[in-house]
Structure formats: structure tokens, C-alpha cells
Amino acid sequence: MATMQQDTAAVSRKEYAVTRVGDVQVPQGNTSRGVNREIFKYLQEAAPAAGWKTLLDLPCGHGLFVQTVNRHLPLQAHGADIMPSPAHLAPHEYTRFDASAALAGPLPEPLQGRYDVVTCISGIMEFGNTSQFFDFCAQRLAPGGCFIVTNDSIFTVQDRLLYLLLGRTRRLKLFRVRNQSVWHIIPMPTTVGMLHAAGFRVERVVHVLGKPKDLWMLPLAALLYPLLRLYVGCSSFFEKSSIDPGLKAGMYSFRSLFCTSYVLICRRQADVPGAADTATRS
């Protein structure tokens, strides 16, 4: 009990902030506001229709998302992370595992099987071998399953202005604070490219508004978006890009200019032979 109290105290207050999906209160967890809500809402609709039964969340942090899924969805969720004992997961719901060394050695028994859904919620920026991590997730995903990965955006109007004027972004500041966790910049095009290389195709791009105060960017976004849309439409000429037009539109929709996080919903390319990325956007 003492250990559980100590771990609970280590959870920041913001992780307990909740947003509603119907009657369910979805905690924010160790990610940006609204991200867990969007994933939960998607799984609430898609999991019963697809017949998904199991979920692996890696890295899972203190386990708030896994706990919510186990309580409110017809999925058996399991979490994995490097901490000894997360505050909100029972021992049978958790495996201690270093995702940064996913392919380096033998796997713990709970991670040797395959899962219908694998989620990586705001975790890919914390270790440098993201391509190998995606390969590992592809190996853990069952046929017909779904891989969901999220990250912070660096393409909002605010990020663009900060980089133009000061050479920094919202998350990547000029100076690193002592004991601050490592945060690697992984732009969305890089993430999508690594997903393709790991055998995934992106089915849907969801841009998530962090806080209502971020709506201050709307007027500037409205001015910038026509130019952005024109450039994206002509990118096959300017950048020799072969990405499907639907995926391009999803990556750089109007919401991308003021939403501070994004969610990529992916399937294995092997599950849909010959299919190209035709992502929807929201």
C-alpha cells in the first residue's frame, strides 16, 4: 500500500483532468488534453465492429488510459513501461519493459503474443530509435488489428511564428531545464515515413485541439491556409512527393494550423493488399 501511495503521489494533477465521451470520464493521462478522449472515442466505435478483444499500451505511463479501457470498453488492455509499479494498474495488467530497447533482447511473456490494438500515446518523442519501435509494434499487432500513435504537432501557427522569430517551438525551447526529460522532434511527415517503412498504412489523421485558448490562432490560420493548401496540392511538383492526396490533405488540414497534437490511426499494409494510404481527416 505504501508503494501504491507513493506512485499515486508522483502522478501530476493534470493527468487526472477528465473529458467526457458520453457518460465516460476519460482522464488526460501523461499526454496533451483531448488525445486520450479521441482514442477512446475511436475504440468505442471501432472495437465492437472489428471484433477486437485485446490492447497493448506502450509506453503506458501510470496506466490511467489502460485502466479506463478495462473499465469501459470490451477490450482486455495491458500496459508496459519502464517504471517499477504504475499507480493505477494491477500486476496482471502491467509489464515492466523498456520500449527504447524493444528489439534488443528476449521479450517478457505478456509481450510475446499479439494484440488487436497497439497504442503509443505521446511516447515516440522520448527515445531515439523510433523506426525500430514501429517494427516491434508491427510484430505485436494481430492480423486485422489497429496501431494508434500520437505526437505533439510542430506545425501550428504558434510554432511557425516562434521558429521564425526565435528559432524555437512550443515544446522545444532554447534552453533545456535540468532533469527535464528528453524530447526529440519528430515531425509528422517523418512519423508517416517511418510507419510506411514498418509496413503500416495511415487510415485516418485526427488533429486534436489542446486548450480552448489555442483558438487565438484561428484568424492567422485562416490567412495562411489557402497558401498551405495550394502548396500541398502542388507538392507532387515541388517536392516530387508520391504520397496519396487524401493523406496529404489529412496531414495538413485547416485544423493542423491550430491543433497542438495529432493522432494517426494505422493498419498493417499486409491486411489490405495493394491498398494505398487514403487517410480521412478530422
Image (cartoon, helix red, strand yellow):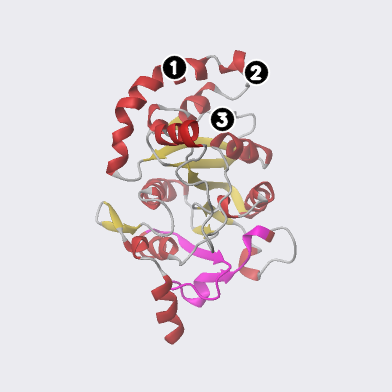
- Tell me the residue at 55%/75% (across/down): 84
Tag nearer the camera, 2 or 1: 1
Q: Which residues are magenta?
A: 73-100
State the CA–CA distance, disc 2 to disc 3.
Answer: 17 Å
Residue at the extreme right of the image, as rendered: 105
Q: Which mark is residue 139?
A: none
Q: Which amino acid, by three-letter code, is at mark 2?
A: Lys
In percent of width and height, residue 169 lies at 48, 40
Q: Which amino acid, by three-letter code, is at mark 1?
A: Leu
Secondary structure of the residue carrying tag 1 is: helix
Q: Which residue is mark 2?
A: 240
- Within 10 angstroms of label 2, few (less than 14), some, or many (20 or more) residues? few
Q: Which mark is residue 227?
A: 1
Q: Which residue is mark 3?
A: 277
- Within 10 angstroms of label 3, few (less than 14), some, or many (20 or more) residues? many
Relative placement, left or right, of 222 versus 272 is: left
Earlier-in-chain disc, 2 versus 3: 2
Q: Which amino acid, by three-letter code, is at mark 3?
A: Asp
Earlier-in-chain disc, 3 versus 1: 1
Task: Using the image, determine if residue 91 lies above or below residue 223.
Answer: below
Secondary structure of the residue carrying tag 3 is: loop
From the viewer's side, name the closer residue of 62 and 143.
Answer: 62
Tag nearer the camera, 3 or 1: 1
State the CA–CA distance, disc 2 to disc 1.
Answer: 18 Å
In percent of width and height, residue 257 lies at 40, 31
Q: Is residue 95 magenta?
A: yes
Secondary structure of the residue carrying tag 2 is: loop
From the viewer's side, name the closer residue of 279 and 3.
Answer: 3
